Image (spheres, helix red, strand yellow):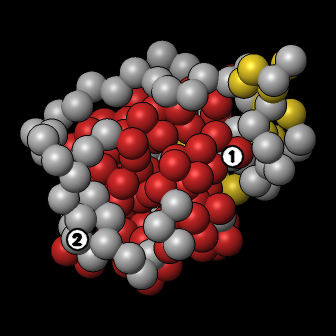
Amino acid sequence: MHGPALVPDVEADRVPTMNGIPIVPLTGPVNFLDALEPEPVYRMPAEYNTNHTAVQIIKEEETLQLEAYELGGVWLIGYGHLMLEGEKDVITEAEADAFLRDDLHWCEGAIERYVDVPVTLNEFSAMVAFCYNVGSGKTRKSSIVKRVNIDDRPGAADAFLLWNRMNGVVMSALAKRRARERTLFITP
């Protein structure tokens, strides 16, 4: 088990390469917990809830922290829940799951507002998982959302990989997380 998840600060201009070959993973291991569609099915984001596969990715990447911890000047608890004034600094796993559900609803709402084209459940869920990590403001401005909205799905998928740095440094944990989200995004 590793420590709390990292949060990227900005979107990079490009995927890091050496001699033209990406030096970050392009795909990552995903345990698909939901039935996969033989062909992509596209619906508006408001018709979806985050699938179990994305929730599992979030839980594995964030790791469960039952005691409050500081990261980047903010206090978090559970599965990376941003603590609000007056919330307890020690919680149960059930309380962490409740925070996760509430925070997922917030991210689902953000994707509903920002994405104005039909998407697959896996595309929606991957974007929600991304939003959960970076926040709704960065999600709204991301190339992921911009490219999805112009129906550039390959570009949107690759744009996940641009969010792997903290303070300008590529972080292995973020690169792996983005590769997993990208894998979910590109799977029908």
Q: Is residue 100 above or below residue 161?
A: below
Identify the mark nearer the N-term, 1 or 2: 2
Element class at badge 2: loop
Say if residue 165 shows up in the picture. yes
- Residue of label 1: 163
Give how far across and how far down residue 147 sits, in percent.
Answer: 57, 65
Amino acid under disc 1? Trp
Q: Residue at x 86, y 34 (%)?
A: 169
Indicate the quadrant where residue 135 lies. Answer: bottom right
Q: Which residue is mark 2?
A: 43
Q: Is residue 3 or residue 69 the one in the foreground?
A: 3
Q: Residues within 10 Å of mark 1 (few under 14, many from 20)?
A: many
Point out the frontmost of discs 1 and 2.
2
Q: Which mark is residue 55?
A: none
Task: Name the amino acid, label 2.
Answer: Arg
Element at label 1: loop
Q: How far across and down, in percent of the image, does residue 30 sit?
A: 34, 27
Q: Is residue 117 above or below residue 72?
A: below
In the picture provided, is 33 more to the left or to the right than 58?
Answer: left
